[in-house]
Image (tube, rainbow, N blue to C red):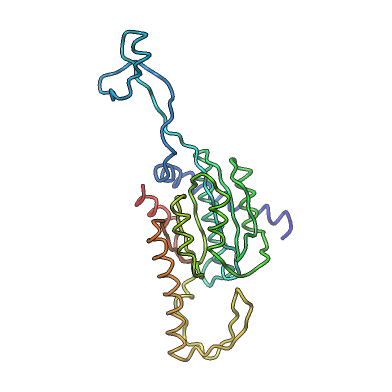
Amino acid sequence: MDTKELLKKVRKIEIKTRRLSDHLFGGEYHSTFKGRGMTFSEVRQYQFGDDVRNIDWNVTARYHEPYIKVFEEERELTMMLVVDISGSNAFGTQEQFKNEMATEIAATLAFSATQNNDKIGLILFSDDIELYIPPKKGRSHVLRIIRELIEFKPKSKQTDVAKALKFLHNVMKKKAIVFILSDFIAEEYSQTLKIAAKKHDITGIRVYDKSEESIPNLGLVQMEDAETGALQYINTASKKVRTEYGAFFNDKENYYKNSFSKSGAGSISCATHESYVKKLLGYFKRRG
C-alpha cells in the first residue's frame, strides 16, 4: 500500500470512528472507566449540606470559620489496545474482514480515551509480540496506532493469547484499561488471563464471522488453514463433518466466555455483520 492510499484509509477511519467516539462513547467511556481516585483541588467556605468529614481544620482554625477541602476526580488513565493480527483475522464473508472491524473498534476506543486526556498504547501480537507502542497522549499518536493496525505485516500467522497477556503484565507496571481484540481461536490462556485481570481492568472483544459458526453442504471443498497454510479437502456433504465444524466453533466460544467470566474480566462478542456500536454501548451501559 502506497503512502497516499494509506493516509486516505487512515483519514477515512478517523472521520468515522472519531464521530462515533465524540457523539456516543465520550460520556459512556468516562462514566464506565473512572479515574484512579480523588485528588485535592482547593479549599472553600463551608456551605450547608457539605460533608463535615471534608472540613480542613487548619484553615478553619486560622480564619475562625469552617472551610472544606474540595476534591476532583483524578482522571488520567492508560488504555492498552492488545490486538491479534494472526492469519485467521484476515477473513470475512460479510461486509468486513474481522481485522477491519477490529481496527475500527480499536480506533473508536482510542479516540474515546483521547477525549478524556488518557494515554493509549498498542500491542500487536501473533504467537509472538509483533509490535509494542508505549502509551502516549494525543491525536497524532492515535493516528500512528491506526496506521499500524492497517499496514503492519506480521512475521507469523499463528496465535498465542497467553504470550500477549504475559507481555502486557510485564510491561505495564500500573493498572491499565485493557481491550483485547481477537477472534480467540486459541486455547490455554485462561490462567494467564486470571493473573493479568487481578492487576488490570480487562475486556475481551471477540470478533468473528458468521460463516465460522456452521458450514453449508457444498460437497467436496478445498480449505486452507489461515494460520498454518495447510491445505486439505473437506467433505461438507458429511453430516459428521458439519457437526464437528460447529462443535469447534462452540468449544472456542465457550472457552472464551468461561475464561473471561472466571477471571472477573468483561467480554463482548461481535460478528462482522453486526453493529459494534450497539455492542460497545450496551457493554458500557451495563458496566457504568
227 relative to 122, above or below: below
- Residue 100, quarter of picture: bottom right
List x then y, in percent, for residue 56. Answer: 35, 18
Determine whether, in the image, residue 65 is placed left or right of residue 140: left
Along the line of sight, the residue nearer the viewer: 84 or 90: 84
Residue situated furthest left in the rendering = 49
Along the line of sight, the residue nearer the viewer: 142 or 135: 135
Screen quadrant of the N terminus: bottom right
List x then y, in percent, for residue 6. Answer: 68, 55
List x then y, in percent, for residue 13. Answer: 58, 53
List x then y, in percent, for residue 96. Answer: 54, 65
How many numbered circles are shown? 0
129 relative to 58, above or below: below
Determine whether, in the image, residue 7 is placed left or right of residue 14: right
245 relative to 34, above or below: below
Rendered residue at 49%/52% (across/down): 178
Rendered residue at 43%/63% (across/down): 269
- Residue 244, quarter of picture: bottom left
- Residue 50, quarter of picture: top left
Determine whether, in the image, residue 126 is placed left or right of residue 57: right
Along the line of sight, the residue nearer the viewer: 6 or 49: 49
244 relative to 107, above or below: below
Rendered residue at 42%/84% (across/down): 243
